[in-house]
Amino acid sequence: MHSPKKSIVIYNKDWHKGIIGIVASRLTELYYKPSVVLTLTNGLATGSSRSVQGFDIYKAVDSARDLLENFGGHAYAVGLSLKEENIPEFTRRFEEYVANNITPEQLTPQIDIDALLTFSQITPEFVSTLRLFNPFGPGNQKPVFCARNVRDFGSSKLVGKQLEHIKLDLVDDTSGKVISAIAFNMAQHFEYIHSGKPFDICFTIEENRHRNAVSSLQLQVKQIHTRK
């Protein structure tokens, strides 16, 4: 279950100062909330913070400046230090500011789409061309595509320990081609999908290579947009 809080502030006096910026970035990526990570350095709780797209974290930290020893940075990343005993009050005030000023859109991950695709365009030649762009990683992210008006082929099902993921077999209206897909942590859409109504998806194309060197395609769904 996701916390109803709109921000994250965590403290551990034993964390190495060199990693806290990375941890703050990862928390923001994972939970899509402004995050502050603190450790103990020279008797002070010293930390790093990262923001989400469009939210000014500098103003959020500044709203509790009377609790801080010093701070500095910009709209998306701030360094700060404060006395250990001020952490609970800082956490409360920081959350209060974020909750009062952040918008629902800013708490929703934004996905940059590289191209609109139909299933008939996902050919072996297209996948071979994509392969030329490997290796994917920081600075060379996997392309994200969008397909409109896809439907459940009729065999989609919930999977995972808590049935939190959807294993999908999808078709669109451009060909009779059935493409497998996986949608992690999107079980809330299953009932709609199972009803056979059309929906849009954002996805990356993954290749599953088997021991016998035969590879199968699977779409990894990043976002599902159902019709009202």
Image: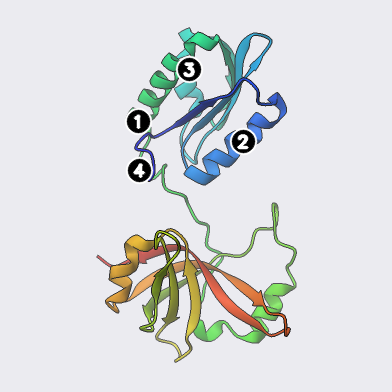
Three-letter code, disc 2:
Val
Placement of 54 over or under 48, stated as above or below: below
Q: Residue at x 59, y 38 (%)?
A: 25
Of pointers 3 and 2, the one earlier in the residue sequence: 2
Assign a secondary structure to mark 3: helix
Q: Quadrant of the C terminus?
A: bottom left
Q: Is residue 224 left or right of residue 208?
A: left
Determine the CA span between mark 1 and mark 4.
Answer: 10 Å
Determine the CA span between mark 2 and mark 1.
Answer: 22 Å
Taking depth in this image into account, of 162 and 134 the one nearest to the observer is 162
Determine the CA span between mark 1 and mark 3.
Answer: 15 Å
The residue at which mark 2 appears reads as 23
Mark 2 crowdedness (10 Å alpha carbons): few <14, some 14-19, many ≥20: some
Placement of 66 over or under 17, stated as above or below: above
Three-letter code, disc 1:
Ala
Mark 3 crowdedness (10 Å alpha carbons): few <14, some 14-19, many ≥20: some
* Position in image of residue 40 (x %, y %): 63, 16
The residue at which mark 4 appears reads as 104
* Position in image of residue 35 (x %, y %): 51, 32
Q: Which residue, as the protein is rendered here, is positioned at the far left?
A: 228
The residue at which mark 1 appears reads as 99
The residue at which mark 3 appears reads as 62
